[in-house]
Amino acid sequence: MCQECGCGSGGGDVKIGPPPHQHDHHHGPGHPEHGHAHTPAHGILTLNLNRSLMEKNALAAERNRRLFRAKKLLVLNVVSSPGSGKTTFIRETAASLTGKLRVGVIVGDLATDNDAARLRTAGIPVVQITTGTVCHLDADMVAKAASQLNLDQLDVLVIENVGNLVCPADYDLGEDLRVVLLSTTEGEDKPLKYPPMFHSAHVAVITKCDMAAAAGFNRDWALANLNRVSHHAKIFELSAKIGDGMKGWLDFLGERAATTQHK
């Protein structure tokens, strides 16, 4: 996990929304170029704070949660490995809810805004978070991205997390529902390989069911593994691309959104 291995420590590379204006920084004549990091003159200073590395994220997630609840938003954190069909699933969900629920998306990716461009074809507001080397979204990133959306004009906010089944499991974003995807092309044992993520999910969605036969997908084995690791999660089986199974998912989402709006 991130707090142990230190992956994605280059948090300064994170960009939210459109690329910022950039300019070169030069010193005047006679002023040599130098870095702006300064080290203590008398060696390394170590502070033992005895505080959880995740405390900052937990506090930010709780602030997000209070804001989202005040806005009566249903918030989904959609997680999966790369290529499981997250973007298509979210796009088709949003398109199917047109005229029923207003959907906005925050999308995270390491390097490109390709997924954001695909999602905008559904006619919905989208904010891109480009994480650079960071392998997950955290609550502070989500807060900054959410500030670029008119939350009063939304009923459902979907956060498309970075494609990764490891580190995002640690990070509460302030969501109501964590939705984990398992595609029929990935293998039935994914829940067993990544139990923290699947165990933390409120909803598990088997995607690309139209490709199950071609992939040799063993449905019974997959369901058994999900029920073993994600026994508390609501399970859906669907193909967002051709629409099979989407009605059950959309009905569930509508019911949860209605409950959120009447709290």
Image (cartoon, grey):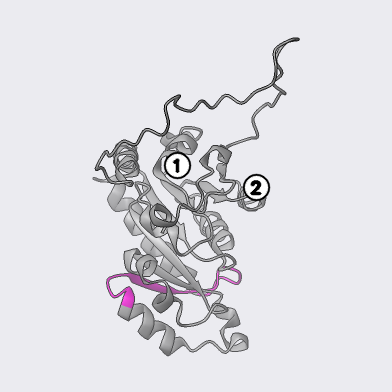
Q: How crowded is mark 2: few (under 14 residues within 10 Å), some or many (20 or more)?
A: some
Of the numbered discs 2 and 1, the one sitting upstream in the chain is 2
On whether residue 198 falls in the magenta region, the answer is no
User: In x, y percent, where is residue 192?
Assistant: 39, 78
Helix, strand or loop at label 2? It is loop
Residue at 43% of width from left, 46% of height from top?
Answer: 138
User: In x, y percent, where is residue 85?
Assistant: 57, 66
Residue at 43% of width from left, 76% of height from top?
Answer: 193
The disc at residue 142 is: 1
User: In x, y percent, where is residue 105?
Assistant: 51, 47
* Residue beneath disc 2: 113
Span shown in magenta: 229-244
Circle 2: residue type:
Asp
C-alpha span from label 2 to label 1: 16 Å
Q: Residues within 10 Å of mark 1 (few under 14, many from 20)?
A: many
On whether residue 239 falls in the magenta region, the answer is yes
Q: How many marks?
A: 2
Residue farthest to the top, as pictured: 29
Circle 1: residue type:
Val
Rendered view: 140 above or below 230: above
* Residue 236 vs residue 193, the one in the foreground: 193
* Residue 16 vs residue 104, the one in the foreground: 16
For the N terminus, the image quarter is: bottom left
